[in-house]
């Protein structure tokens, strides 16, 4: 699918799992504006599921440093579009709390379902 279609599909699939987009960073646009450097389309979507984020913040207030879940949608030089997800287990294990580890597993399962529908 095209880059723009991938953005739409990823956003809709995330919404289906209760995630909204808190941040949409246009990396390619920023590189062009700040450095006058061209690169293929590249966006970082900061996805957040409010009930899960609330549970995490209640358990560990500093966990905001590790939120939101980043999803990268990028096009390579050959024109292929890639969608890549942060692994919440890898990031949230840094907190070393059983309730956070369980929450990370739930977030990962939701993101895996998103990946399967793309």
Image (tube, rainbow, N blue to C red):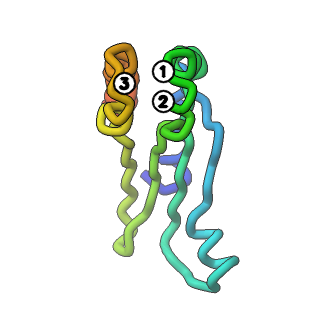
Disc 1: which residue: 17
Q: Position of residue 33 (x, y in %)?
A: 69, 77
- SS class of the residue under badge 2? helix
> Which mark sits nearer the N-terminus, 3 or 2?
2
Quadrant position of residue 47: top right
- Label pair 3/1, CB-CB below 8 angstroms: no
User: Viewed as shown, does residue 46 lie left or right of 76?
Assistant: right
Q: Is residue 118 above or below residue 24?
A: above
Q: Position of residue 63 (x, y in %)?
A: 51, 31
The crowding category of the residue bearing disc 2, from other C-alpha atoms within 10 Å (few below 14, some 14 to 19, many at least 20), is many
- SS class of the residue under badge 3? helix
Disc 2: which residue: 13
Residue in the foreground of this view, choosing between 116 and 106 = 106
Image point 46% across, 45% down: which residue? Answer: 71
Residue in the foreground of this view, choosing between 33 and 104 = 104
Q: Is residue 102 above or below residue 93?
A: above
Label 3, label 2: how far apart the Cα atoms are = 19 Å
- Label pair 1/2, CB-CB below 8 angstroms: yes
Disc 3: which residue: 104
The crowding category of the residue bearing disc 1, from other C-alpha atoms within 10 Å (few below 14, some 14 to 19, many at least 20), is some
* Residue furthest to the right: 33
Regarding residue 74, the answer to whether it shows in the image is yes
Quadrant location, the C terminus: top left
Q: Where is residue 114 in the image (x, y as percent from the top left)?
A: 39, 30
């Amino acid at each position: 699918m095209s880059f723009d279609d991938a953005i739409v599909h990823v956003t809709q699939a995330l919404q289906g799992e209760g995630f909204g987009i808190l941040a949409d960073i246009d990396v390619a646009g920023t590189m062009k504006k700040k450095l006058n450097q061209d690169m293929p389309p590249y966006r970082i979507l900061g996805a957040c599921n409010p009930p899960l984020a609330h549970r995490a913040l209640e358990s560990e207030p500093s966990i905001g440093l590790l939120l939101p879940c980043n999803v990268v949608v990028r096009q390579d030089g050959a024109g292929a579009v890639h969608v890549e997800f942060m692994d919440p287990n890898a990031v949230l294990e840094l907190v070393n709390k059983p309730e956070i580890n369980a929450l990370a597993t739930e977030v990962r399962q939701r993101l895996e379902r998103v990946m399967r529908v793309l």
